Structure formats: structure tokens, C-alpha cells
Image (cartoon, rainbow, N blue to C red):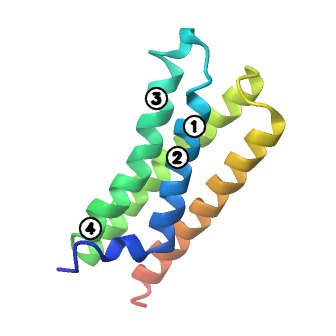
Amino acid sequence: MQDKQSYKKLIVYQKSKELVLFVYEITREFPKTEEYVLLPQMRRAVVSIMANIVEGYAKSRKELIRFLSISIGSLTELEVYLDLCLELNYLKQKRYDKGYNLLIEVKKLLYGFQKSLRNGV
């Protein structure tokens, strides 16, 4: 078992947390009509990314790889929501680009971390 707090040193954790904060920031500005639809879906997906990194980190290597896969699934879900927000004009292009670039960065980190674990690094 690893140190319970050492996951905070992981770049993938730090960047996923940054993504959580970004999504919470942008969803505060959503129309009232999205209060029970898109807003909670986006928040649930983004929190799931970070939470699964942490939960998997407290388990075996094999379990961590599985939890990272779940994070990747949630990240892909969030990507669809971000695209939808742009098309619905809930986000301006500049904000979308910031979120999308952060999302891609987290995706690369997740895949890289997962690959290193599979290769025994």
C-alpha cells in the first residue's frame, strides 16, 4: 500500500484537479435550464476522472490500471459535453480551447501513466 497522500504529487492528479476547477468555473455561468441536465453530468464526469485516479492509486497496480481506464472513459464523456457546450454557445471559443487543451493534456497523462504501469516502469 502506498502513502495515502502521495497521489497528490502525481502530475496527472494535479492536472485532473485543474480540469475539475475549470469545469466548475464554466458551469457556474450556464443557463438555469441546464441546472438538472448538462451541468450535473459535466461535474459528475470531471470529478470521476480525479476520484478514480485517487481510488486506483490506493489499490494494486492491476486495479490502478483499471481505474485509470475508468478515468479515461469519464474524460471522453467530458469531451463530448465540452463540444456540446461550444455548439450551444454556452462557451466562447477561447474558453472552449482552454478546456479542450487541458482535457487533451490530462488524456495524454492518463494514457502515459497507464502505459508505464503496464510496462512495469
Do the numbered discs 3 and 2 sit on residues whose CB atoms are within 8 Å?
no
Q: Nearer the viewer, mark 1 or mark 3?
A: 1
Mark number for residue 41?
A: 3
Mark found first going from the N terminus, 4 or 1: 1
Furthest residue toward left = 1
CA gap between label 4 and label 3 equals 25 Å
Can you give x and y, in whole percent of width and height, for residue 81 in the image?
60, 32
Mark found first going from the N terminus, 4 or 3: 3
Mark found first going from the N terminus, 4 or 2: 2
In this rendering, the answer to whether 85 lies above or below 52 is above
- Give the residue at x 34% y 60%: 67
For the N terminus, the quadrant is: bottom left
Q: Nearer the viewer, residue 88 or 6?
A: 6
Q: Does 35 sit left or right of 105 as displayed?
A: left
Q: Secondary structure at mark 1?
A: helix
CA gap between label 4 and label 1 equals 31 Å
- The kind of residue tagged 2 is Leu
- Give the residue at x 27% y 60%: 55
Mark number for residue 25?
A: 1
Can you give x and y, in whole percent of width and height, for residue 41 in the image?
46, 29
Sort mark 4 into few (<14), some (14-19) or many (20+) by Cα contacts within 10 Å: some
CA gap between label 4 and label 2 equals 26 Å
Mark number for residue 21?
A: 2
- Give the residue at x 82% y 41%: 94
Q: Nearer the viewer, residue 107 or 36?
A: 36
- The kind of residue tagged 1 is Glu
Do the numbered discs 4 and 3 sit on residues whose CB atoms are within 8 Å?
no
CA gap between label 1 and label 2 equals 6 Å
Mark found first going from the N terminus, 3 or 2: 2
